[in-house]
Image (tube, coloured by chain):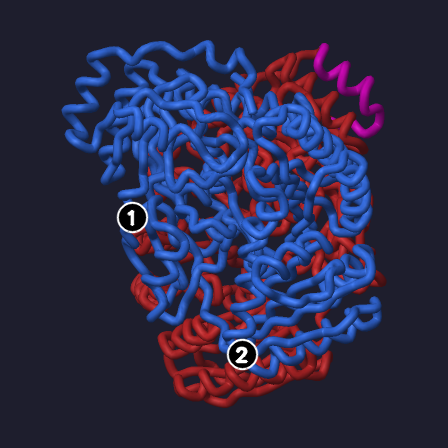
Chain colours: A red, B blue
Amino acid sequence: MNHPAQLTELRRPLPDAFLASLRALFGDRFSTSQAMREHHGRDESSYDPMLPDAVVFAHSTEEVAAAVSLCNQYKVPLIPYGTGTSLEGHILALSGGLSIDLLQMNRVIAVHAQDLTVTVQPGVTRKQLNTEIKDTGLFFPIDPGADASIGGMTATRASGTNAVRYGTMRENVLGLTVVTAEGKIIKTGTRAKKSSAGYDLTRLFVGSEGTLGIITEVTLKLYPQPESISAAVCSFNDIASAVNTVIVTMQMGVPVARVEFLDENGVKAINKHDKLSLPEKPLLLFEFHGSEHGVKEQAEVVQEIAREHGAIGFEWATRPEDRSRLWQARHNAYFALLQLRPGCRAISTDCCVPISHLAEILLATKADCEQQQLIHSIIGHVGDGNFHVQMMVDPNDPDDIARAEGVNARMVERAIAMDGTCTGEHGVGLHKMDFLIQEHGEGAIDTMRSIKHALDPNNILNPGKVVRW
Amino acid sequence: MNHPAQLTELRRPLPDAFLASLRALFGDRFSTSQAMREHHGRDESSYDPMLPDAVVFAHSTEEVAAAVSLCNQYKVPLIPYGTGTSLEGHILALSGGLSIDLLQMNRVIAVHAQDLTVTVQPGVTRKQLNTEIKDTGLFFPIDPGADASIGGMTATRASGTNAVRYGTMRENVLGLTVVTAEGKIIKTGTRAKKSSAGYDLTRLFVGSEGTLGIITEVTLKLYPQPESISAAVCSFNDIASAVNTVIVTMQMGVPVARVEFLDENGVKAINKHDKLSLPEKPLLLFEFHGSEHGVKEQAEVVQEIAREHGAIGFEWATRPEDRSRLWQARHNAYFALLQLRPGCRAISTDCCVPISHLAEILLATKADCEQQQLIHSIIGHVGDGNFHVQMMVDPNDPDDIARAEGVNARMVERAIAMDGTCTGEHGVGLHKMDFLIQEHGEGAIDTMRSIKHALDPNNILNPGKVVRW
């Protein structure tokens, strides 16, 4: 997919003095090699790569501050880089500049088990974090699928399957250390669980996608590992019955930890990929966390609700291996889908709507995909009203891509008309900038732009993303 | 208590043309009467009143926008006003100007029961809201004690007793309609439960205390009314045992809905005021929400933990009338305490610390109060590490006030050293502006100030609060 031409206009060679200063600061952790630039110039979106001119690997907040100060002095664009798993073009170097790789800042700085908090460097990945804190009896629930870095998850306001119970990065970041555009180091919050102390800088930087500051430390909430976990799976003859089951479940206040939807195409794909034999119909996959009795009670309530909505089968999985098998299949869904069309690439959408509108938008979007003859599947974090349509396109066929983008645009319009959002968890990056205007209106975008101008007056922080200058 | 002198410098008479325009717009909902100005020039802090020059009662977002546009045109300070129950001087008219009373904007605009959301005008009070939505089976949990307006609660990032389970206004506001300093109307969010769509304007305006924009609509999350509720109360020989009981309860993941702490002075006061006979020792008061069995299980786990920490007695109250009696006593604590010293006024503090430090700060602060011979009590939303020291002072005795402020200042210093906050839920207003700098550091305050300058370039929105210009 190509970029709008005007966004490349800013690119110009980096000043020699700037490069020399970086080299002096970072030594062999500074690189302008083609391979290194290529690695840092792509994400998992379907955009073509756009390379930064140079890359540094930072080891401390102070090093980040020094690099940002240099960029500010020489007006060089900079982009923070984590695991490169973003989906909307967040880390593409539209106007070249410096990629600051934070993945080597991967230390768990402090676990405070009594307070249920942990402070980490931004390059810690979520799986690493959970491995390192396992013995405390606590865990960090946010699971966007990819083993993303905590810094990247914070910058994108990520969430995933567990959000229905545990919230998103918005709710789970307590405070940040941030390097501002001027290279100053600030702390946005404390470890207090709540606070009314001034403007909520923490939440402003969460989801700012590297455009307002560089996140160099993150303090997160942790949760007790549940005493008991069980999973259940059930199928429905139609999408509306599956969605209505979820609506009633939420209205009854059942504290489900996860509730995932797969359409019949998704089920077909994972059946094939994971050698399962699930009915090839709309499916709900639940996970329950709680006391042994609590988990049983939750599952019984949900089973009853599902039955009232015509569920076919309701299989429980309390044994860890059965649970793992089901959830592994769900996690593999993306790859399973890619195999539906060899050589394809998936374009993934990311709307989130008030749940009362969910069935309606799923059906309309499915009809649209079918009309456009797109191989597709819908997977949803339905407890939150968030879903992804994966459309399998030939990356070399502009018509294929245009039809998929057409489906996406119409779906976003529907979502916005339903008082929903163009992105539930993937972020804006490049891809959603126009949708953002549609969703918020020019007035709110102006407010966002005023903030961008105030905090990054030289437009050096990931320029050309989120809001236009 | 007096105001810093420099803050009154800006006061100047309002231009006649401005007043004439307001009168034309608001008719008999415009007033410059002394009584009306006095009503809008004080809150529940111990500050002396500071009166606005004029008051208007707005009935719509458009009227607010018109009033703000006029203020912007004539550079007149304006302050939004709700129930006047703020505690830190938020609504005092330091430099005169216009008070925009929003209490008549008190309509519940839309209840979306399936989506668990409600949209209200800012003058709806929390009790009114819960009365109006009762039949839906849903409720809004945030309970700061006072029957505050939703607009005011949003602007102060309020919380209260239920926050340990349901979060604060930060977590429970989905989106806002805001009038900007230029008089433009913007929407900051949708009804989607989660979103990664751009900068989190919602969270920026939540807690901004009228200094960044005027909130004219609030969309909130709702929750299913719990199937079952029970309460329990137990006493301890010392503060540390009570706090440790709470720490273990949180670490075990027991989803308590409320857990409140009262020191022995607080218990004495409510025993007297509510004719109870609770042991006059540190006390914990729990409330459990859930299924019938779930509530029983939670209470049993907590009872066991409390016993291991030497709890004296563990009384259950599952009958609504018993529960009400206990919680009514807790809610009356403020008034009960005032009766400990006839004619006094209470100075209330509002720190929040990581819970592992809670016992330490409570003991140090108690010792300080005793050394300063202040009649006092400590009441805490201890599940969150948030507590209030109420010091009963003679409002006409500067020495009394100075000693109480000294205790507060030393306590805030301790809280900040523990990575806690100077205000858990009351906000900054006038009173915490210096503490805010101590807590965040000049760098973060500069970032807040940049945002203030960007969004309110003429400094008309509640000037002199939160951050200095």
Q: Give the vertical position of A259 relative to B91 (above or below).
A: below
Around disc 1, counting alpha carbons within 10 Å, would you say few (fewer than 14), some (14 to 19), or many (20 or more)?
A: many
Residue A39 appears in view: no
Q: Is residue A457 left or right of residue B75?
A: right
Identify which residue, A394 or B379, lies in the foreground: B379
The residue located at (63%, 51%) in the rendering is A172
Q: Residue A117, position in %: x, y?
A: 74, 51
User: Closer to the camera, A429 or A116?
Assistant: A116
Query: Which element is circle 2 on?
Result: loop
Q: Is residue B206 left or right of residue A117?
A: left
Q: Quadrant of residue A367?
A: bottom left
Quadrant containing the N terminus of chain B in the rendered view: top right
Residue A121, picture quadrant: top right
Nearer to us: label 2 or label 1: 2
Q: Which mark is residue B106?
A: 1
| Residue in front for this viewpoint, A307 or B443 | B443
Tell me if A41 is positioned left or right of A131 in this view: left
The chain to which mark 2 is attached is B
Q: Position of residue B285 (x, y in %)?
A: 65, 64
Q: Position of residue B91 (x, y in %)?
A: 44, 30
Q: Judge if badges 2 and 1 mark residues of a common chain.
A: yes
> Which chain is disc 1 placed on?
B
Residue B319, numbered label: 2
From the viewer's perspective, is residue A72 above or below residue A185? Answer: above
Magenta segment: A17-31
Q: Which of the two discs, 2 and 1, labels the residue nearer the N terminus?
A: 1
**Above or below — where is A207 with respect to B144?**
above
Instruction: Give residue A160's position: percent from left, percent from top.
Output: 57, 59
Query: Is residue B216 visible in the rendered structure shown here?
Result: yes
